[in-house]
Amino acid sequence: MATNTHINNWINRAELDYYTMFIKSWIPFNAWYMKDFYDESSTPKRTSDRSIIDFLNANSNKYRDKIKSLLRGTDVASKDFLELLAKLHYELESHPIPDYDNRISFLTVSLSRNTLKTYSQSVGRFTYFVEFQDQLPKTQKRWFLEIQKKVNNQTLNRVELFEWSLEELNNDPDFISIIEQDQKNKLRDTFLNINPKKPIDVVIKPKRNRNGNFSQPNDSIIIDETNHLYFTDDYDLVSKVIVQLIYDLRCKLFHGELDPIEANLGVYENAYKIQKILIKELRA
């Protein structure tokens, strides 16, 4: 006689494990790029996953060329691919991975390191200033934020942080002590401009017509017309963002930073289905 426990266990086993399936879809991609692009003699060396992914995004190759072809296409395969991109976007926005401040998203992908060490902006009577002193050891605070009077450069507020982190900034007592919320917002905005992993946003807001309806903005790709989701029509940039985003999802999973709960499963379901389409191009 079957028990409720038996029934529940069999139901659980009937569910597809998209975490594992995503890993299986990554393995042939990993094997392909290691075989074709690993190079100890190059400058810089291409011997790590990170360095090879950067190389793939800087050069034409079968994997990224397939993405651009699907983005441009109008056939069934292209429409299916765009639908998966839309679903992945919605899942990532609904279920931030690994968390909201550090989430992986089409709104926050970083392709290259931001080299800015200082940034300032003047608004009204104040100057908002941020500096990264990378010559200091990591054991010391290296990020310095100030609100200064524009008229005499007098420092009114100063915040010192160990690393670039919105969470660390928001929890810092000196930042919390700033009375004016508008000043806190502007200092945070200044901090965002010097983010070492300054994000790229490929999502374009729809146009709103006089009658209140939405329509496709100029220079955009229709990802989901029903829900007014559009990406920039810079196909090369979007293809790089997709490669980077898939790689970021791989890293969170492989490095154990992800809690493999059911809520996050939809993200990896769509990432797996996208990856499954792309690796077919890699057959010898």
Image: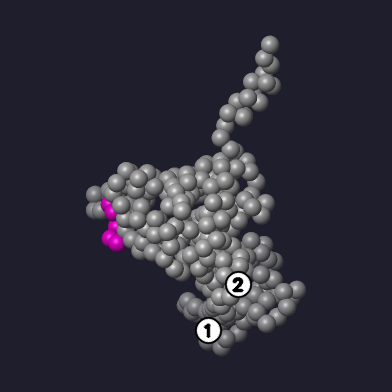
In which quadrant of the rendered view does residue 155 lie?
Answer: bottom right
Residue at the image position 43 percent from the left and 52 percent from the top? 281
Tell me which segment is drawn in magenta: 215-219
Most extreme residue toward the right is 139
Report the amino acid beneath label 2. Glu
Badge 1 crowding class, 10 Å Cα cut-off, few under 14, some 14 to 19, many 20 or more, is: some
In terms of secondary structure, where does tag 1 sit? loop
Instruction: Residue 29: give x, y in percent of width and height.
Output: 52, 54
Image quadrant in which the N terminus is located: top right
In terms of secondary structure, where does tag 2 sit? loop
Scheme of colours in the image: one colour
Instruction: Residue 245: give x, y in percent of width and height.
Output: 51, 57
Name the residue that disc number 1 marks.
150
Residue 184 seen anywhere in this rendered image of the structure: no
Task: Work out whether 247 lies above or below 51.
Answer: above
In which quadrant of the rendered view does residue 175 lie?
Answer: bottom right
Badge 2 crowding class, 10 Å Cα cut-off, few under 14, some 14 to 19, many 20 or more, is: few
Residue at the image position 61 percent from the left and 54 percent from the top? 252
Task: Work out whether 85 lies above or below 50.
Answer: above
Task: Count numbered badges in the picture.
Answer: 2
